[in-house]
Image (cartoon, helix red, strand yellow):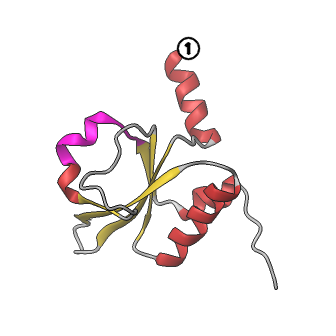
Amino acid sequence: MSAIHMDESMFEILTNNSMRWGSRWEAKSDRFEVHAKPYPELPGFRWKMAYWVGENAASMVLARSWLIDQGHDFELVWDMAEHPNGEYLGWVLLTDYETESWKEINTRETA
């Protein structure tokens, strides 16, 4: 059996977008389907960050697995908003985990 070894840079490669999450997304909550049991109607807005990985299920599984391996909690949702070409924005991982890139942004903004 072989294992896949990832680091944060690979996690960032899997994501095609990331931004701060939180209550400001409540107005757009109808565009997200929650993939958790039991199935709540709305995603949690307590999380700090959202990482989009697109429609590719393999990318979602790898990014999800990396968060689990690193000990980070998360919530998995599907973003039904569409790109101009009609593709869905796809899988989103909501989490309190911040990549080093986001930590640097936060440091600059609070300085």
Going 36% across and 61% down the picture, which residue do you hit?
38
* Quarter of the figure with the C terminus: top right
What residue sits 62% from the left and 65% below the top?
A: 65
Q: Relative to 14, is 37 on the left or the right?
A: left
* Up/down of 26 relative to 65, above or below: above
Q: Nearer the viewer, residue 108 or 91?
A: 91
- Extreme residue in the top direction: 111
Q: Nearer the viewer, residue 66 or 10?
A: 66
Helix, strand or loop status at disc 1: loop
Magenta part of the chain: 20-28
Mark 1 = which residue?
A: 111
4 vs 66, left or right, is right
Residue 96: image location, x then y, percent = 52, 40
Q: How would you classify the magenta stretch by its main secondary structure?
A: helix
Q: Nearer the viewer, residue 17 or 73?
A: 73
Q: Please tell me whether residue 59 belongs to the stretch shown in magenta.
A: no
Residue 25 included in the magenta stretch of the image: yes
Q: Residues within 10 Å of mark 1 (few under 14, many from 20)?
A: few
